[in-house]
């Protein structure tokens, strides 16, 4: 995903039927919703998709489904590394790429143990590149099984190979984000920030866009921010939108992704709140909180003429 116009890359939810099977008609509706909201691409088979709770075949089948529904309207990236020997991970990377993805995402916490040095991690990345010739890769600093954050120097080295085109950043440090963007300057590459706390600063620093869980509540608002973050005529509105996300960050993270599915139901989407991940009790207090959130969004969206 080349660094051009700013874009929103949603970390896709995985809808399930109430019996726990993947709900493919709902996955179609979700894919179409993201695209209609203005997403610049799609990140399938990610943590929000409950990727660790899916079987190997479910991962591939759901990726193929998203690619088919997208129909080339936007590019799709998807996770391709899971536990196992490096050769096994490389084989799955190939399968994910064959499913029609633009780039295959590497989970940084699955290429080396938490105790391993950066040198060990770097060596395994280069081995993976050697074993997956010609396939564009990306990184996701996923918090599971542990968060391994890349340094600007590491990212610049990997991007310099011409094989790494995408990075979902979760460092939560705007100075590090700026340094990573600078380290990858001049390459076909995009950094997408996951942290809404400094979203506007990140976009102004040169991030290619945003890839955040908040887009699973209000994708249109993330798209609006990507389109207007540097519009002087909308400066006060940009501040309001940024503050809306900051103030409601706790609500949106509570028992996620259940709460995101419930939020979409509140907005009229036909989707079950069933999740395979054990995320805690969706209590009446949490339910009331997201209902209030949806009401506040409706007020905000009307003022921005999104509704």
Image (cartoon, rainbow, N blue to C red):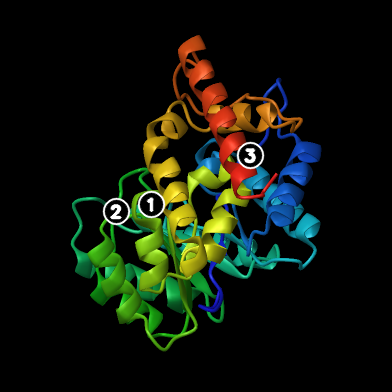
Q: Residues within 10 Å of mark 3 (few under 14, many from 20)?
A: many
The residue lying furthest to the bottom in this view is 186
Residue 261 in percent (x, y) is at 61, 31
Q: Residue at x 21, y 66 (%)?
A: 118
| CA distance for labels 2 and 3 | 25 Å
Give whichever of 41, 6 is nearer the camera: 6
Q: Residue at x 60, y 67 (%)?
A: 94
Left or right: residue 223 versus residue 129 is right
Q: Earlier in the sequence, mark 2 or mark 1?
A: 2
Q: Residues within 10 Å of mark 2 (few under 14, many from 20)?
A: some
**Do the numbered discs 1 and 3 sit on residues whose CB atoms are within 8 Å?**
no
Q: Secondary structure at mark 3?
A: loop
Q: Which mark is residue 238?
A: none
Give whichever of 116, 49 is nearer the camera: 49
| CA distance for labels 1 and 3 | 21 Å
Q: Considering only vertical position in the picture, is 28 above or below 256?
A: below
Left or right: residue 25 versus residue 131 is right
| Residue located beneath label 3 in the image | 14
Q: Place residue 106 in its image quadrant.
A: bottom left
For the C terminus, the quadrant is top right
Left or right: residue 195 versus residue 303 is left
Give whichever of 203, 153 is nearer the camera: 203
| CA distance for labels 2 and 1 | 6 Å
Residue 126 in percent (x, y) is at 36, 76
Q: Which mark is residue 195?
A: 1
Q: Earlier in the sequence, mark 2 or mark 3?
A: 3
**Do the numbered discs 2 and 1 sit on residues whose CB atoms are within 8 Å?**
yes
| Residue located beneath label 2 in the image | 172
């Amino acid at each position: 995903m080349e660094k051009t116009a700013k874009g929103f890359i949603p970390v896709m939810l995985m809808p399930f039927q109430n019996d726990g099977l993947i709900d493919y008609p709902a996955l179609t509706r979700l894919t179409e919703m993201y695209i209609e909201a203005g997403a610049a691409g799609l990140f399938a088979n990610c943590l929000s998709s409950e990727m660790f709770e899916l079987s190997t075949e479910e991962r591939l089948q759901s990726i193929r489904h998203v690619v088919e529904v997208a129909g080339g309207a936007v590019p799709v990236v998807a996770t391709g590394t899971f536990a196992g020997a490096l050769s096994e991970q490389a084989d799955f990377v190939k399968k994910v790429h064959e499913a029609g993805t633009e780039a295959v995402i590497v989970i940084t916490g699955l290429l080396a143990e938490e105790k391993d040095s950066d040198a060990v991690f770097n060596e395994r990345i280069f081995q993976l590149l050697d074993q997956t010739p010609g396939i564009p890769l990306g990184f996701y600093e996923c918090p599971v099984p542990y968060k391994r954050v890349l340094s600007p120097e590491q990212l610049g080295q990997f991007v310099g190979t011409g094989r790494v085109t995408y990075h979902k950043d979760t460092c939560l440090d705007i100075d590090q984000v700026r340094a990573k963007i600078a380290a990858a300057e001049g390459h076909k590459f995009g950094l997408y920030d996951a942290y809404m706390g400094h979203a506007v600063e990140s976009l102004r620093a040169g991030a290619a866009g945003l890839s955040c869980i908040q887009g699973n509540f209000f994708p249109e608002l993330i798209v609006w921010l990507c389109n207007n973050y540097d519009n002087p005529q909308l400066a006060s509105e940009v501040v309001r939108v940024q503050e809306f996300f900051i103030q409601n960050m706790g609500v949106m993270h509570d028992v996620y992704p259940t709460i995101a599915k419930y939020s979409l139901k509140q907005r009229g989407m036909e989707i079950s709140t069933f999740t395979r991940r054990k995320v805690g009790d969706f209590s009446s207090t949490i339910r009331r909180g997201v209902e209030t959130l949806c009401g506040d969004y409706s007020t905000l969206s009307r003022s921005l003429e999104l509704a």
